[in-house]
Amino acid sequence: MYPPLKITFLGTGTSSGVPMIACDCPVCTSTDKRDKRLRSSILVESAKTTIVVDTGPDFRYQMLRENVKKLDAVLFTHPHRDHIAGLDDIRAYNFFTKRPMEIYADSLTEEAIRRDFYYAFSDTKYPGLPELNLNTITLEPFTIGDIPVVPILVWHLKMPVYGFRFGDFTYITDANKIEPSEKEKIKGSKILVLNTLRKQKHISHFTLGEAIDIVNELQIPEAWFTHLSHQMGTHAETESELPDEMRIAYDGLKLAI
């Protein structure tokens, strides 16, 4: 049995966020709060354990907005800046818990963390620096607290990216290809979250049409699309085009499973 989980979408936008700086398009000037998208991240909570997937540039604000007082671990999908840039702000949790934050990442992402946040790994430790305990993950399943985690390898053009299945919930961002063997890990999920950058073809992200095809192929009963750019169109317009079992995620959305 899987523990009951609450999923909070901390951000549902692409690397530039929505609205995009200096853009006057209908999406970026929309007054619909669902069209205001921070960089993509989710909060996964059981009764005992709290995990954040990715700490983008908006991490500090996301934690304040959702009033996250307790955080047990951070799980990373890949090393791009819009997914790791906010890691320094983890030091607030270090201050209150008096212990390092548990970080779970593959070797490629771990290399980027050590490079970008080199000062956290210096032999000379100054007060106030982030304290991180790196846990290198592979495709082997593991557990964080009482939450089971099944890594799913997907491809962001030529970069390996990790999606994650938490019980009956699967989260995949920054992908444009999933091998058949990895699709098997997704089958049986009750909810699938999948990146959909825009409707037009893109070199390293699924389009809306491609994401819909995957949901249908895997016969997932409920799907939410994330990591949207302003090129997708407004939330209201895009969602009106989708089948009933598929929806557009938005910042602050909460799901229970």
Image: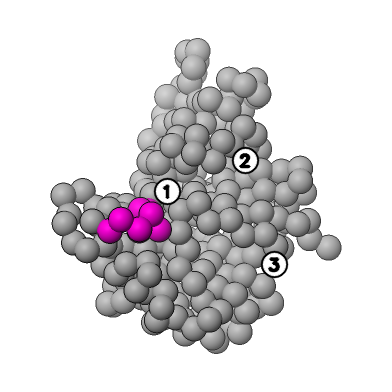
When the figure is inspected, residue 91 is found, relative to residue 162, above or below; the finding is above
For marks 3 and 2 on the same chain, the one whose residue lies earlier in the sequence: 2
Residue under the point 53% across and 81% down: 244
Residue occupied by mark 3: 168
Residue occupied by mark 2: 73
Pick the front one: 209 or 244: 244
Residue 216 in the image: state x and y as whole percent: 54, 86
Q: Mark 2 packing: few (<14 Cα in 10 Å), some, or many (20+)?
A: many
Q: CA distance from mark 3 to mark 1?
A: 24 Å
Residue under the point 69% across and 77% down: 188
Pick the front one: 141 or 25: 25
Residue type at tag 2: Ala
| Residue 197 in view in this figure | no
Q: Is residue 246 left or right of residue 97?
A: left
Residue type at tag 3: Asp
| Residue 251 in view in this figure | yes
Residue occupied by mark 1: 83
Q: Is residue 68 left or right of residue 231?
A: right
For marks 3 and 1 on the same chain, the one whose residue lies earlier in the sequence: 1
Q: In the rendered image, which quarter contains the C terminus?
A: bottom right
CB within 8 Å, label 3 to label 1: no
CB within 8 Å, label 1 to label 2: no
Q: In the rendered image, which quarter contains the N terminus?
A: bottom right
When the figure is inspected, residue 163 is found, relative to residue 142, above or below; the finding is below
Residue type at tag 1: His
Helix or strand or loop: what does disc 2 sit on? strand
Magenta span of residues:
30-37
Q: Is residue 172 left or right of residue 45?
A: left
Q: CA distance from mark 3 to mark 2?
A: 20 Å
Indicate the quadrant where residue 236 lies.
bottom left
For marks 1 and 2 on the same chain, the one whose residue lies earlier in the sequence: 2
Pick the front one: 123 or 67: 67
